[in-house]
Every structure is written in structure tokens, then in C-alpha cells.
Image: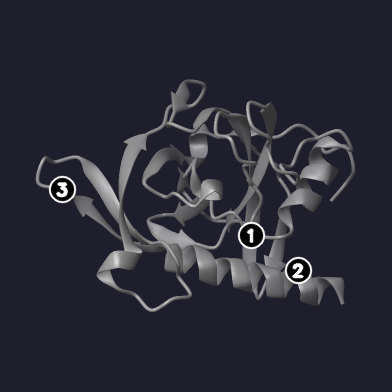
Amino acid sequence: MKQMIYRAAGLLTGVVMLCTIAGCGKDKNGEGKIRVIENSMAETTEESIQEVDVKPGVMGEEFATDSVTATMDSVCMPAYTFKDNDKELSILFFQLTVTNHSDEALPLNFLSQSFSVQADGEAFAGITLRGPRFILLQFGEGAEAFADNIQPEETRQGYVCVEVPADFEHVKLMYYPNAGLIDWSQAFSFEMDRSDIQPAPDPVTPY
């Protein structure tokens, strides 16, 4: 029964994530931008499409929007793989430090649509309900999985679990810091080759 729930949640998340990305390109000034649908479940109109300013993110360097300051601290990959719908998957753990400067609580869970994933150039539903469980197994009881909202002026460091095809060679993680505040106007792109990702330490609890 649990496996069925996980698969259903993963499928739902995949639909949301894949529908979020509407296209990419450059504006007339040559700046990288993409267009995303604010509400993927609604009828698409010009009013529902939002231009997104995409900036390259650098691992270990702080970046900011008007509402959020964040650092992508590190990324690692355990040797563990698993099958889902006959696809062999690997997992990546991105460690983030986030400060919420808005006056609203900031969600950063798998439903917040704060992340989208591309593996070898193709959109992939990499953020699922399984993530918090993998974080618990890998890093133990005290590991932060952003299950609770980040409160105004609170700083929190934790992990985001990303699922990718086991044979991937290149991965891109798009992070929309203000997505939990219903704003996808700014994004940061983190791209890396498989060879650049460090192996994860032994898990606290075997997978």
C-alpha cells in the first residue's frame, strides 16, 4: 500500500513539474529567460504565463532575491539505486541554506514547486514524496528535510532529495527561491556533470 501511495504522489509531482516548464530561450537583450505557467491546472492564457529571469547558480556562493537569501552548499550521490515503473533511478542530495526575508512562511517541500530537474537535457520528475524518507535514511533523525515552513527571518540548512535516471551524465537543477510565495519570476540554475558530484558517505540506516 505504501508503495502505491509513493508512486501516486511521485506521478502527481511529475505532472506538476513537467507542466511547470513551458519553454526556454533568450530575450531581445540576450539574457537567459524561460516562460513558466503559473497555474498548470488552469487554462493557459497570456496572463497565466510568467517570464522568468534565470541566473547561473554557483555551488557554495550566496545568491538572493527580494524575499530569499540562499546558498547551494553541496551535492552528493549515494551508490544506492532503485526501480520505479521499470526505470532504474539514482538519488542526489542537494544541501541548501535558506533565509526567508519575507513576512510570510516559506514552504520548501515537494509540493512548493521550488525545483525542477533536467537529466541529460530532458525534463524529469525528480522531486517526489520519497525524498524525506531517503534523507532520513542517509543522514539520520536530525537531518532537515524542509518538511516545515521556514518562518519570516528564519535561516535553515537542510537537504533536498532529487531523483534522476541511474545512467545520467549531466543534471540541471532549477531553483525558484520565491516559489513558495507564489512567485516564479526568478530562478537559479545549477548544472553539473556526473563526474563532478561527490559520493555520499555511508548512510546512517541502510536503504
Residue plotted at (15% across, 48% down): 27
Identify residue for label 3. Answer: 27
Q: Nearer the viewer, residue 158 or 45?
A: 45
Report crowding for label 3: few under 14, some 14 to 19, many 20 or more residues within 10 A (C-alpha). Answer: few
Depth-wise, is mark 1 or mark 3 nearer the camera? 3
**Location of mark 2 (residue):** 6
Q: Indicate the quadrant where residue 167 lies.
A: bottom right
* Sequence order check, earlier mark of 2 and 3: 2
Residues at circles 1 and 3 in contact by the CB criterion of under 8 Å: no
Mark 2 and mark 3: span between their CA atoms? 39 Å
Q: Amino acid at mark 1?
A: Leu
In percent of width and height, residue 98 lies at 60, 30
Q: Residue at x 62, y 73 (%)?
A: 11
Q: How crowded is the residue under tag 1: few (<14 C-alpha within 10 Å), some, or many (20+)?
A: some
The extreme left residue here reads 28
Q: Position of residue 193 (x, y in %)?
A: 45, 40
Name the amino acid type tagged 3. Answer: Asp
Q: Residue at x 64, y 64 (%)?
A: 88
Judged from the image, the secondary structure of the residue bearing numbered disc 2 is: helix
Going by the numbered disc 2, the residue's amino acid type is Tyr
Depth check: give the residue in front, 184 or 198: 184
- Left or right: 101 with respect to 49? right
User: Which of the pair 48/53 is nearer the observer?
Assistant: 48
- Is residue 131 left or right of 27 when viewed as pictured? right
Q: Which mark is residue 56?
A: none
Name the residue located 34 percent from the left edge and 66 percent from the top edge. Answer: 48
Q: CA distance from mark 1 to mark 2?
A: 14 Å
Q: Which residue is mark 1?
A: 89
